[in-house]
Amino acid sequence: MNDRYAAFHALHRPGRPLLLPNAWDAASAAALAARGHSAIGTTSLGVAAAGGKPDAAAATRGENLDLARRLRGLPVLLTVDVEGGFSDDPAAVAGYVAELAALGVVGINLEDGRPDGTLAPPELVAAKVAAVRAAVPGLFLNARTDAWWLGVPKPLEQALHRARAYRDAGAHAVFVPGAPDDTVGLLAAEVGVPLNVLHRPGGPSLAELGRLGVARVSTGSLLFRAALGAALDLADAVRAGRDGEPRAVPSYGWVQELSGRFGADHTG
């Protein structure tokens, strides 16, 4: 296992969760890196919306590769949300992940939710997991089940069954977005690999999730949506003649400096 893969694996410690902020473009990723985050994920909604495409529709294969290429000079460990891998052919999914790995990506998020709102058969997802592990053994594979996200019957039973299947196929961690707070401790105890959950505003803190055994907490699309909300609020304030500048707006010079330090042509 190369050093970058090993460093990312080491960040997943049950009880001491990694906060993984999710970026959607070069500027957001560079800003998060400048703020001291050593690992960053991508948000599939943010990447899709920034490109004028729908999320969870297997439409951003190229956008993910382009963003990974743009971010390869950042001094961070990057994991990419690849939705369902953009194919139902495990070999094709593995080949795509190998392309990302060649660009310096150290992890992926692979989900079982499908564009039609159903869950893919667990055997198919497990086959994708196994194929990726065989193709890029050290890359950190976070297998996501959308049992709660898609509102399927008996979500806890489904989530545990799928988590175990993905673990047995080689997943390094399991991501269960939307899991109710009162199930998180059970999931952490039962899945057998580090548990990843989604941060929920007003929900348990990082410390509280750590006490439940969580190893990783992602922000998902929250930062992207918050940035859109702040932009709309400011535009509305200017239109209404109010002083609407929010707190801590990055300066023009700071953003320019980030672009110069971590821009697309940076290869350090």
Image (cartoon, grey):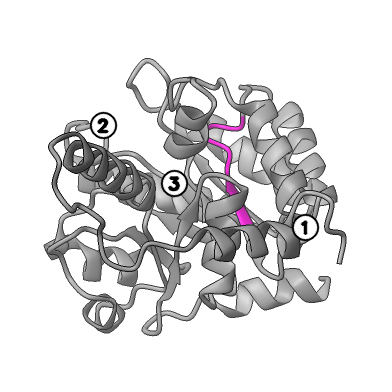
Q: Is residue 247 left or right of residue 39?
A: left
For disc 3, the marked residue is: 144
Q: Which residues are magenta?
A: 79-85
For marks 3 and 2 on the same chain, the one whose residue lies earlier in the sequence = 3
Cα separation, mark 1 vs mark 3, equals 18 Å
Q: Is residue 243 left or right of residue 28?
A: left
For disc 2, the marked residue is: 150
| Amino acid identity at mark 2 | Leu
- Looking at the rendered structure, the secondary structure element under dot 3 is strand
| Amino acid identity at mark 1 | Pro
| Amino acid identity at mark 3 | Arg
Cα separation, mark 3 vs mark 2, equals 12 Å
Question: In this orientation, which residue lies closer to the viewer: 244 or 51?
Answer: 244
For disc 1, the marked residue is: 137
Q: Is residue 126 left or right of residue 100?
A: left
Q: Residues within 10 Å of mark 1 (few under 14, many from 20)?
A: some
Count of numbered circles on the image: 3
Cα separation, mark 2 vs mark 1, equals 30 Å
Asked if the residue under mark 3 is in contact with the one under mark 1, i.e. CB atoms within 8 Å, the reply is no
- Looking at the rendered structure, the secondary structure element under dot 2 is loop
The C terminus lies in quadrant: bottom right
Q: Is residue 125 visible?
A: yes
Labels 2, 1: front one: 2
Q: Is residue 231 left or right of residue 80?
A: left
> Which residue is pictured at 44% across the width and 46% down the height?
144
For marks 2 and 1 on the same chain, the one whose residue lies earlier in the sequence = 1
Q: Residues within 10 Å of mark 3 (few under 14, many from 20)?
A: many
> Which residue is pictured at 32% across the width and 78% down the height?
213
> Which residue is pictured at 79% across the width and 56% down the height?
104
Q: Is residue 108 above or below residue 206?
A: above
